[in-house]
C-alpha cells in the first residue's frame, strides 16, 4: 500500500478558488481515523493519515479548496500558511494519482 504522506513535486496548479472532487474511478474505506483508497484502473491501494482522510471525506462532493482549508483550520491547530502548503501538496499528489479532479471554476449553475 502506498502511503500518501509526502510532498509531491508535481506541477499541478492549485489555488483557493479551485474546485476539487474525488473521481469515480476509485473506491475508498475509512479505517479508524485513516482512509484506504483503491484506484480501480491501476489496482493500486493508497493510504491517508487522519488529516488526509478528512480532506478525502470533504472531497467526496465538489468543494472549493478554500472551504477545505477553512475546515482544517477550524479542526486542527495549525498556522494558515503551513496548512495551505500541506493541503496543496496533498491535493497535487491526489491529482497526480488521478484520485481527484481539479477544476478552475465553480460548478455552473446552468
Image (spheres, rainbow, N blue to C red):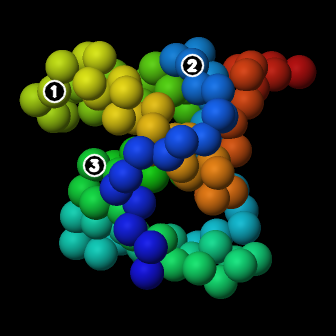
Q: Secondary structure at mark 3?
A: helix
Q: Is residue 87 visible?
A: yes
Q: Residue at x 44, y 24 (%)?
A: 67
Q: Is residue 66 above or below residue 94?
A: above
Between the residue at mark 1 and the residue at mark 3, the CA separation in whole angstroms equals 12 Å
Q: Nearer the viewer, residue 1 or 110?
A: 1
The residue most toward the right is 110
**Of callouts 2 and 1, which one flags the residue occurring earlier in the amino acid sequence?**
2
Q: Which residue corresponds to mark 3?
A: 51
Image position, residue 72 (x, y; %): 28, 32
Is the residue marked by circle 2 packed among few (<14), some (14-19), or many (20+) residues within 10 Å? few
Q: Which residue corresponds to mark 1?
A: 78
Q: Which residue corresponds to mark 2?
A: 15
Task: Find residue 59 and name its label.
Answer: none
Among the 4 quarters of the image, the one containing residue 2: bottom left
The residue most toward the front is 9
Q: Secondary structure at mark 2?
A: loop
Among the 4 quarters of the image, the one containing residue 38: bottom right
Give yes or no for contact between labels 2 and 1 (Cβ–Cβ under 8 Å): no
Between the residue at mark 3 and the residue at mark 2, the CA separation in whole angstroms equals 19 Å
Image position, residue 81 (x, y; %): 29, 17
Is the residue marked by circle 1 packed among few (<14), some (14-19), or many (20+) residues within 10 Å? few
Locate residue 59 relative to residue 99 in the image: left or right: left
Amino acid at each position: 500500500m502506498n502511503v500518501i504522506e509526502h510532498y509531491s513535486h508535481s506541477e499541478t496548479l492549485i489555488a483557493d478558488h479551485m474546485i476539487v472532487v474525488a473521481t469515480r474511478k476509485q473506491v475508498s474505506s475509512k479505517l479508524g481515523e485513516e482512509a484506504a483508497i483503491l484506484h480501480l484502473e491501476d489496482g493500486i491501494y493508497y493510504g491517508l493519515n487522519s488529516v488526509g482522510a478528512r480532506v478525502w471525506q470533504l472531497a467526496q462532493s465538489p468543494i472549493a479548496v478554500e472551504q477545505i482549508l477553512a475546515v482544517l483550520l477550524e479542526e486542527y491547530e495549525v498556522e494558515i500558511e503551513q496548512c495551505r502548503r500541506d493541503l496543496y501538496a496533498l491535493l497535487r499528489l491526489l491529482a497526480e494519482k488521478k484520485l481527484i479532479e481539479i477544476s478552475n471554476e465553480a460548478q455552473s449553475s446552468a
